Amino acid sequence: MTKTYGKTTVVDSLDLDVAAGTVHGLLGPNGSGKSTTMKMLLGLVTPTSGEISMLGHPMNRDTRAQVLAGVGSLIEAPSAYPHLTGAENMKIASRLFDADPANARHAVELVRLGNHMDKLVKNYSLGMKQRLGIAMALVRDPRLLILDEPTNGLDPAGIEEIRELIVSLARDEGRTVLVSSHLLSEIEKMASHLTIIDRGRMVFQGSQQQLYDAQLPDLYIQTPSARLAAELLAPLNPAETAGGVELSGLTDEQVAEVCTHLVSHGVPLHQVVRKRRSLEEIFIGLTGREGLSA
Ligand SMILES: Nc1ncnc2c1ncn2[C@@H]1O[C@H](COP(=O)(O)OP(=O)(O)O)[C@@H](O)[C@H]1O
Ligand SMILES: [Mg+2]
């Protein structure tokens, strides 16, 4: 999919591949095109070019209503009427879609709002509003949920509740969840698969494991002869640190060669450590910029 506003391309040839039954995180800094992508999937924004297929069906004018009947969504702000109760909002959502009332009862239990259904939504906490929004998205018993930054603005306890809810939607109920966030720390804990976008372009897509596996760990060598070590390893662009040198992008074989080389030139090795990068560091490596932490 591509979306262009005037001369600005905000989503650039994004090929989003979400496997059924997974929690798939759409991760990117603010303004990277997450909401635009989700709105295109939901038919709220028309793609400038590209094709969309969801739940095994291509989306076009003829199929759109039927495909979207299997998709529940929560886009940006909570969607309930504040001056009505939770129960009244659920009833409206149910009637709107002519849905089985049993779905709504199940959804309310799932989001653990059973004891708050008679309260006015304006008196709900933000976390409760988000949970009600997710319950409303579940009234048609959708196989796919598209949730845009559902943890935005929540406190840590609220974030944890939404996270557990999202994980259980996939793990216990077999649904597919596409969830966006600009915070790595959140996506990392709930999504098995990731699409990372930056300025509308995809910089990574795959499982979290693949993301880590694709990254060679950094090598840290502690030695009292840091200067000499840095000179010997100059072609590998080492960074000289307080008590040693640091290198990145080395294979296992190269690490062995580096150690042999240093020892044969009389450099004492006090510690040789390989350390995995954090997701944050990987993101910076992929995009050349920061911007995915709180
Ligand atoms: N209707 C619009 N007209 C013009 N530009 C837009 C419109 N909607 C979004 N954009 C721009 O597209 C970019 C991506 O926005 P968005 O999809 O909301 O990003 P994200 O959800 O990742 O924060 C931003 O630079 C935003 O200003
Ligand atoms: Mg957004």
Image (spheres, grey):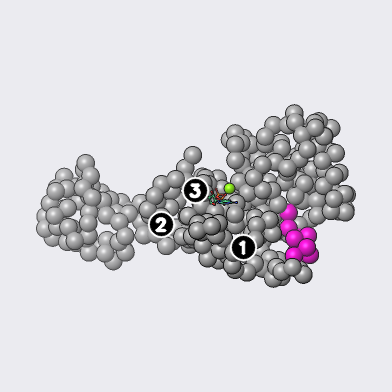
Image: 49 above or below 123 = below
Q: To which residue does mark 3 refer?
A: 29
- The CA span between labels 3 and 1 is 21 Å
Q: To which residue does mark 1 refer?
A: 47
- The CA span between labels 1 and 2 is 26 Å
In this rendering, the count of numbered labels is 3
Q: To which residue does mark 2 refer?
A: 286
Other-residue count near label 2 (Cα within 10 Å), few / some / many at <14 / 14–19 / ≥20: some
Q: Is residue 223 visible?
A: yes
Disc with the residue nearer the chain's start (3 vs 2): 3
- Circle nearer the viewer, 3 or 2: 3
Q: What is the magenta range?
A: 64-72
* Helix, strand or loop status at disc 3: loop
Question: In the picture provided, is 65 more to the left or to the right than 163?
Answer: right
Image: 289 above or below 201 = above
Question: In the picture provided, is 63 more to the left or to the right than 253?
Answer: right
Residue type for callout 3: Pro
Other-residue count near label 1 (Cα within 10 Å), few / some / many at <14 / 14–19 / ≥20: some
Residue at the extreme top of the image, as rendered: 123
Quarter of the picture holding the N terminus: bottom right
Asked whether the beta carbons under mark 3 and mark 1 sit within 8 Å of each other, the answer is: no
For the point 80% across and 54% down, which residue is it? Answer: 140
Q: Give residue 104's position: percent from left, percent from top.
A: 83, 47
Disc with the residue nearer the chain's start (3 vs 1): 3
Magenta-drawn stretch contains 236: no
- Circle nearer the viewer, 1 or 2: 1
